[in-house]
Amino acid sequence: MAIQFNPNISNLQQTAALRPTPQTAHQPQGNKVDFGNAIQKSLEKVNDQQGQANQSIVDLMSGKQQDINSVVADVAKADMSFKMLVGIRNKLVEAYKETMRMQI
């Protein structure tokens, strides 16, 4: 049984459900970004950078590549992106924990 403190709220909810929200009214359907897809793309990009750094190290050790500066740059990029990924993960975990602590 739902308790309604204000009977006008149900009328407002019904009319709000019928009209589109301002965000969806002006956004084309093709430009929507799914949160899961954005995270997946970011993970793939970090993984690609890690693979590229590993390949640069292997190429340097095998003698295919002589430029140590590009290897250091690749490793530094991969390291920075991994640290950013870990920071984002920590923020998401903290936000989840905070949400779970909320009382309903």
Image (cartoon, rainbow, N blue to C red):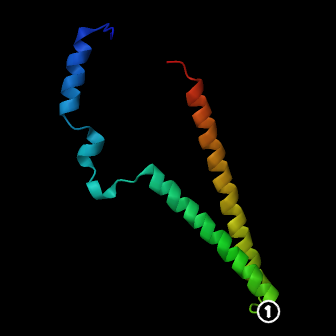
- For numbered disc 1, what is the local secondary structure? loop
Give the residue displayed 78% in from the left and 86% down from the top: 60
Q: Residue furthest front?
A: 1
Crowding at dot 1, Cα within 10 Å, few <14 / some 14-19 / many 20+, comes out as few
Query: Against 32, is 95 above or below?
Result: above
Query: Against 89, is 16 above or below?
Result: above
Q: Nearer the viewer, residue 62 or 90?
A: 62
Q: Position of residue 52 (x, y in %)?
A: 66, 76
Q: Quadrant of residue 54?
A: bottom right
Q: Position of residue 65 (x, y in %)?
A: 75, 90
- In the picture, the quarter occupied by the N terminus is top left
Q: Position of residue 66 (x, y in %)?
A: 78, 91
Q: Residue furthest right?
A: 61
Query: Against 61, is 23 above or below?
Result: above
Q: Quadrant of residue 61?
A: bottom right
Q: Quadrant of residue 29?
A: bottom left
Q: Nearer the viewer, residue 100 or 94?
A: 100
Give the residue displayed 22% in from the left and 28% down from the top: 16
Query: Against 52, is 1 above or below?
Result: above
Q: Nearer the viewer, residue 49 or 67?
A: 49
Q: Position of residue 83 (x, y in %)?
A: 70, 56
Does residue 30 appear to the left or right of 46 in the view shown?
Answer: left
Give the residue displayed 67% in from the left and 69% down from the top: 50
Which residue lies under the disc numbered 1? 63
